[in-house]
């Protein structure tokens, strides 16, 4: 057990005091996108996993499907379609896997389920994620088979007054699947930030939406540790698989204010993907100066990497020319910093490759794989 005393994470440095930096190749090794025709068209990517022999698995919530490509980006196979039967998905939200196997996760609406697939054989088995109270949502999976979870299904969120933000809380725990499944609850954690906006109709007069640049929670499981991060403060809490607090620290990053230029860039990109007037009203409310926080979120994503590592994707730099990630051991020791390609969103961190998504000006997503070099 680590010392639970709160400490600040130090910038990664080698034994000679030189900052350790890992380098990503300038050009992607593989790009899978719409230029390849229908096989490379994605509606909304919710997971990318690198498997054995260079295979790339992509979960697309747009068509409720998992596609597997070879190391050159050619389609090998696809699984899934909208539905509730074996090998079908109602609301595909994530995938995880290694070697030749994948786990796919669904969340509300409908029951929370997991389904196992083999690259060659396809669907293998599945089950529901629930305890005696109700459905669970997967936040991560431990190598020993337990899941890091939160309460699933729809939750009642009190709409805040117009022009104000309100943050909710969520229960987080460790779920052990068995004939009598149970959850060891860690406790309530500060979760998402919400705002209200005019719906454009008289009934109801107001709608509620999550503020994507507001404070939020991110969580991941790595080795025998559960990571819970707060995007507002940069605080990290690391729990053991027994649910006990192992360490607290603060991410070693400099916060910066949200510039008008950056806000406008993000607003334009989101509006390009808006499909109707209601979505446009929501986006205008989310990028209103009256509801935006002063500072940008401390990080964008957290990814459980191979060899018991945790990657914290900090998102775009202040000048928006690149992104950066910090790599930690599962127990919280900082290993390195990595400069990510502009516009790249990290989904998978391997030993020699990273994979993720890049979107063009129209919001069209491509899946990309970059080679990773470990050096100072």
Image (cartoon, rainbow, N blue to C red):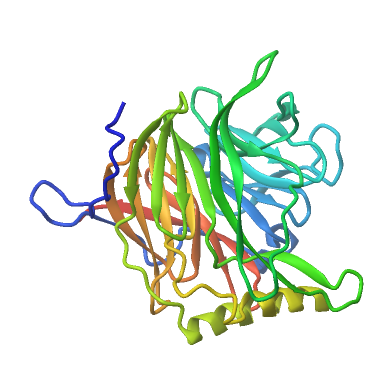
Measuring from the top left, give residue 192's x and y in whole percent.
60, 56
Residue 276 appears in the rendering: no
Measuring from the top left, give residue 354's x and y in whole percent.
44, 52
How many labels sit on residues? Answer: 0
Q: Does 203 appear above or below 145?
A: below
Q: Nearer the viewer, residue 87 or 318?
A: 318
Q: Does 204 appear above or below 150?
A: below
Measuring from the top left, give residue 279's x and y in whole percent.
77, 73
- Residue 341 vs residue 376: left or right? right
Q: Residue furthest left?
A: 16
Residue drawn at the location 91% of the way across and 76% of the way down: 202
Q: Residue furthest top?
A: 179
Measuring from the top left, give residue 225's x and y in whole percent.
42, 32
- Residue 157 vs residue 221: left or right? right
Q: Does 301 appear above or below 95?
A: below
- Residue 163, quarter of picture: bottom right
Residue 179 appears in the rendering: yes
Q: Does 309 appear above or below 302?
A: above
Q: Which quadrant, please, contains the C terminus?
A: bottom left
Q: Which quadrant, please, contains the N terminus?
A: top left
- Residue 53 vs residue 291: left or right? left
Q: Residue furthest front?
A: 161
Q: Residue furthest right?
A: 203
Residue drawn at the location 89% of the way across and 77% of the way down: 201
């Amino acid at each position: 057990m680590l010392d639970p005393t709160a400490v600040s994470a130090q910038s990664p440095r080698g034994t000679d005091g030189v900052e350790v930096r890992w380098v990503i190749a300038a050009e992607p090794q593989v790009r899978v996108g719409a230029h390849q025709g229908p096989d490379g068209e994605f509606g909304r990517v919710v997971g990318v996993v690198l498997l054995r022999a260079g295979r790339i698995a992509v979960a697309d919530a747009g068509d409720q499907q998992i596609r597997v490509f070879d190391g050159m980006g050619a389609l090998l196979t696809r699984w899934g379609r909208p539905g509730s039967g074996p090998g079908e998905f109602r609301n595909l939200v994530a995938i995880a896997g290694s070697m030749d196997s994948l786990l796919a996760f669904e969340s509300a609406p409908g029951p929370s389920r997991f389904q196992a697939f083999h690259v060659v054989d396809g669907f293998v088995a599945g089950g529901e994620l629930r305890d005696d109270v109700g459905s669970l949502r997967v936040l991560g999976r431990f190598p020993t088979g337990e899941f890091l979870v939160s309460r699933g299904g729809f939750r009642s969120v009190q709409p805040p007054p117009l022009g104000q933000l309100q943050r909710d809380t969520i229960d987080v725990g460790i779920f052990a699947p068995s004939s009598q499944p149970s959850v060891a609850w860690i406790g309530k954690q500060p979760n998402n930030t919400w705002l209200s906006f005019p719906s454009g109709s008289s009934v109801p007069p107001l709608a509620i939406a999550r503020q994507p640049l507001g404070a939020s929670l991110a969580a991941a499981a790595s080795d025998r540790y559960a990571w819970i991060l707060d995007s507002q403060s940069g605080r990290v809490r690391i729990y053991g698989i027994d649910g006990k607090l192992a360490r607290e620290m603060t991410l070693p990053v400099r916060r910066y204010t949200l510039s008008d230029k950056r806000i406008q860039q993000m607003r334009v990109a989101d509006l390009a993907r808006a499909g109707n007037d209601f979505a446009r009203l929501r986006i205008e409310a989310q990028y209103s100066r009256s509801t935006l926080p002063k500072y940008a979120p401390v990080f964008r994503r957290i990814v459980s990497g191979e060899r018991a590592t945790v990657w914290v994707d900090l998102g775009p730099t202040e000048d928006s020319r690149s992104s950066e990630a910090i790599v930690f051991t599962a127990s919280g020791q900082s290993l390195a910093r990595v400069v990510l390609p502009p516009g790249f969103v990290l989904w998978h961190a391997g030993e020699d490759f990273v994979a993720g998504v890049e979107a063009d000006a129209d919001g069209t997503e491509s899946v990309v794989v970059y080679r990773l070099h470990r050096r100072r």
